[in-house]
Amino acid sequence: MNISCIDLVDQLKHAGKLWYLVNPYETTFELPHKVPDYQQQVWFPFFVLIILEQIILMSKKKRFRLNDQMTSLSHWLLQESGRILFRGGEYYAYIVIYERYRRWNLPWDSTWTWCITAVGVDFCYYWVHRSNHG
C-alpha cells in the first residue's frame, strides 16, 4: 500500500472528528447523499492514536499489557457496533416520519432553522430523559 504524504496529512485532519472538533461550514449538508462516511474517515487517526499510546507507554518504561489493550479494543468494537445498530434504526425511523408526516420544509441553511431545531432536540431529549426516571 502506497500512502503519499498529502494523503497522510489529509487523514490526520480527520482526527478532530474523534473529539467532535469540526467546522460547521464544512460539515453541514443540504442533502443526505452529500454527507461523507465519517466512520471510515476516523479509522486511520484512531489507529495512529493507539500506536502513539504504545510509544508513550514504552518511553515511560511501562509494561505493555496485551490483555488491557484487547479489553479496550473489544469494548470499543462492542460500543460502536451497538451505536451503529441503534443509530441506524433511529435514522430509518426519522426518514420514514419525515417522508410521511412532514407539514412544511424549513430552509436548511437558515439560522432560525438551526435555533428551532436546537430547541426541538433539547425538548425531546428532556422528555426522553424524564421518561427514564419513571
Image (cartoon, grey):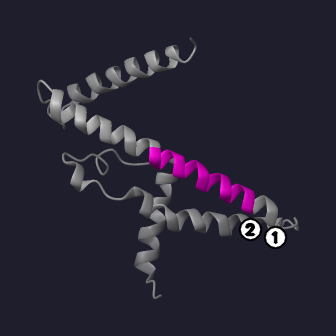
Q: Looking at the rendered structure, which numbered label has been put on residue 125?
A: none
How far apart are the two marked residues, 1 and 2, measured between alpha carbons?
6 Å
Of 50 and 134, nearer the camera is: 134
Of 88 and 30, nearer the camera is: 88
Residue 57 visible to the viewer: yes
Residue at (60% x, 52% y) in the render: 78
In this view, 100 is above or below 16 = above
- SS at badge 2: helix
In this view, 53 is above or below 89 = below
Residue stretch rendered in magenta on the structure: 70-85
User: Which residue is at the far left?
Assistant: 104
On the image, the x and y values in percent for residue 113 come to: 22, 28
Look at the image and say whether residue 81 sits in the magenta stretch: yes
Circles 1, 2 touching at the beta carbon (< 8 Å): yes
Residue 20 visible to the viewer: no
In this view, 66 is above or below 86 = below
Of 8 and 93, nearer the camera is: 93
Residue at (33% x, 41% y) in the render: 91
Mark 2 packing: few (<14 Cα in 10 Å), some, or many (20+)? Answer: some
Residue at (26% x, 22% y) in the render: 116
Q: Which residue is mark 2?
A: 54
Would residue 45 be found to the left or right of residue 127 on screen?
right
Q: Amino acid at mark 1?
A: Met
On the image, the x and y values in percent for residue 105 come to: 12, 30
Q: Which residue is mark 1?
A: 58
Would residue 28 be found to the left or right of residue 2 on screen?
left
